[in-house]
Amino acid sequence: MKTLLKLAAATLILTSVAQAAPKWITVSKADCIDNGGEMKNGVCSANWQDAGGICSAIGASLPTIGQLKGVIKNCGGVVGDDNNANKQTYQSCYKKRGFLPSNNRYWSSYADVAGDAWYVDFYDGVDLANAKNYSYYVRCVRGGQ
């Protein structure tokens, strides 16, 4: 009986870990434009408010700042370290995950009390707040924490 309970607990843990990983969604041109965005370099771009609406329209959400930082860390980068720009393995990793190189910013779902929204720049792994009316790239997520 104890073995069966241990097996059930292990299965539950593995299932919850598997469900924790977000599924990254690349927004189609039609979904982007129909919901207030525009295509730049083949990727959806929008202000923060429209970015959230675009993701919502396709049954997804803007990623949390933690999910975006997770890509940096999982690719061997360090959040906030300008030296990431010189790390070839880091640069190759985030590009393989569908993020554009060279100082391209992606919106997160997080907005601070000052009214600024946070974004992540994968090139150097920096996260910063900026005015919500700027146009940055949009990747959406489903699932994850």
Image (cartoon, helix red, strand yellow):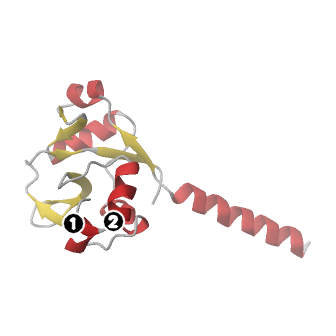
Question: Quarter-wise, where is residue 33 in the image?
Answer: top left
Residue type, label 1? Asp
Q: Is residue 97 above or below residue 75?
A: above
Q: Dot 2: within a 10 Å radius of its alpha carbon, few (fewer than 14), some, or many (20 or more) residues?
A: many
Q: Is residue 2 above or below residue 14?
A: below
Label 2 belongs to which residue?
Answer: 69
Front residue (pair 39, 145): 39
Spatial separation of the CA atoms under disc 2 and disc 1: 8 Å
Do tag 2 and tag 1 residues touch (Cβ < 8 Å)?
A: yes
Q: Is residue 7 above or below residue 39?
A: below
Q: Position of residue 27 (x, y in %)?
A: 32, 35
Q: Which residue lies at the image location 19% right of the left edge and 52% below the top edge?
A: 104
Q: Position of residue 60 (x, y in %)?
A: 38, 42
Q: Is residue 142 left or right of residue 15?
A: left
Residue type, label 2? Lys
Mark 2 or 1, nearer chain start: 2
Question: Quarter-wise, where is residue 7 in the image?
Answer: bottom right
As helix, strand or loop, the secondary structure at mark 1 comes to strand
Quarter in which the C terminus is drawn: bottom left
As helix, strand or loop, the secondary structure at mark 2 comes to helix
Label 1 belongs to which residue?
Answer: 127
